[in-house]
Image (cartoon, rainbow, N blue to C red):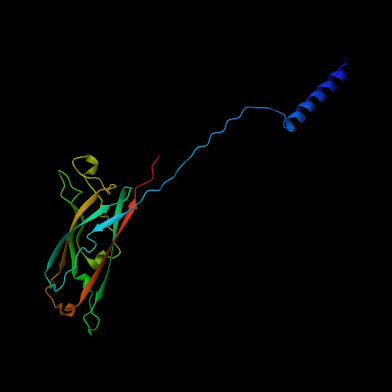
């Protein structure tokens, strides 16, 4: 067979093979499996117990008021931080003119302690120390931070609140006696709002 005929036969065979594949006559085995996958988001659910930390009337300069409350993590995710945002409204007694001074400058948080962030060495963690409500505006202290000894593992509880657990906090307020005329505050009230803002922990490889 001549070279010319051999080349022609080869081209014809190739064309036939392509036409068979294109025509769907090529046979092969096949097996299909399906996976079912889920992405379920966790929950952040912070509770303050009780929801009213302090409700007191008929106070006078020099009075100190101590209260306890809990921060509870009722969600499925750990909480890394709980930031405290302070706001308040001063309500003057009926018919009285506006005060020349801010009542919030005379109500002081002597301390706010997290009783759970303590161990063998350190005392309960001080979140706020001797700060007036006026000075706390704009500040956002972390109510569940352990600043010092947790990394040593000497009995301290680490920062944050694990899911399903809670922290006990202890706070003391004082109507500061400044040894001056504070008559303008007689009959007034201060409505304090503490907003507790819980933050998630950092993402991890799952």
Residue appearing at x 23%, y 66% in the figure: 133
Decide: is 44 above or below 101: above
Looking at the picture, how far across and down is residue 74, in whole percent? 29, 51
Pick whichever, 37 or 13, lies toward us.
37
Pick whichever, 203 or 176, lies toward us.
203
- Image quarter where the C terminus lies is top left
The image quadrant of residue 138 is bottom left
Looking at the picture, how far across and down is residue 90, in whole percent? 25, 74
Total label count?
Answer: 0
Decide: is 169 above or below 180: above
Relative horizontal placement of residue 63, taking residue 9 as reference (left or right): left
Residue appearing at x 39%, y 45% in the figure: 203
Looking at the picture, how far across and down is residue 160, in whole percent? 28, 49
Which residue appears farthest toward the top when viewing the image?
Answer: 1
Looking at the picture, how far across and down is residue 174, in whole percent? 15, 66
Relative horizontal placement of residue 203, taking residue 57 as reference (left or right): right
Relative horizontal placement of residue 68, taking residue 201 as reference (left or right): left
């Amino acid at each position: 067979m001549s070279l010319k005929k051999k080349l022609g036969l080869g081209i014809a065979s190739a064309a036939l093979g392509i036409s068979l594949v294109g025509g769907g006559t090529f046979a092969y085995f096949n097996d299909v499996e399906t996976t079912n996958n889920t992405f379920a988001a966790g929950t952040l659910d912070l509770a303050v117990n009780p929801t009213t930390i302090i409700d007191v009337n008929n106070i006078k300069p020099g009075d100190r008021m101590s209260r306890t409350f809990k921060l509870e993590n009722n969600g499925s995710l750990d909480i890394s931080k709980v930031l405290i945002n302070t706001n308040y409204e001063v309500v003057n007694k009926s018919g009285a003119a506006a005060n020349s001074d801010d009542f919030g400058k005379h109500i002081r948080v002597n301390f706010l302690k997290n009783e759970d962030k303590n161990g063998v060495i350190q005392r309960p963690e001080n979140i706020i120390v001797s700060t007036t409500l006026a000075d706390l505006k704009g500040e956002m202290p972390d109510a569940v931070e352990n600043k010092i000894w947790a990394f040593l593992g000497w009995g301290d509880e680490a920062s944050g609140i694990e899911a399903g657990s809670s922290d006990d906090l202890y706070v003391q307020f004082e109507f500061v006696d400044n040894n001056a005329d504070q008559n303008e505050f007689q009959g007034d009230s201060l409505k304090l709002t503490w907003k507790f803002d819980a933050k998630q922990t950092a993402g991890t490889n799952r």
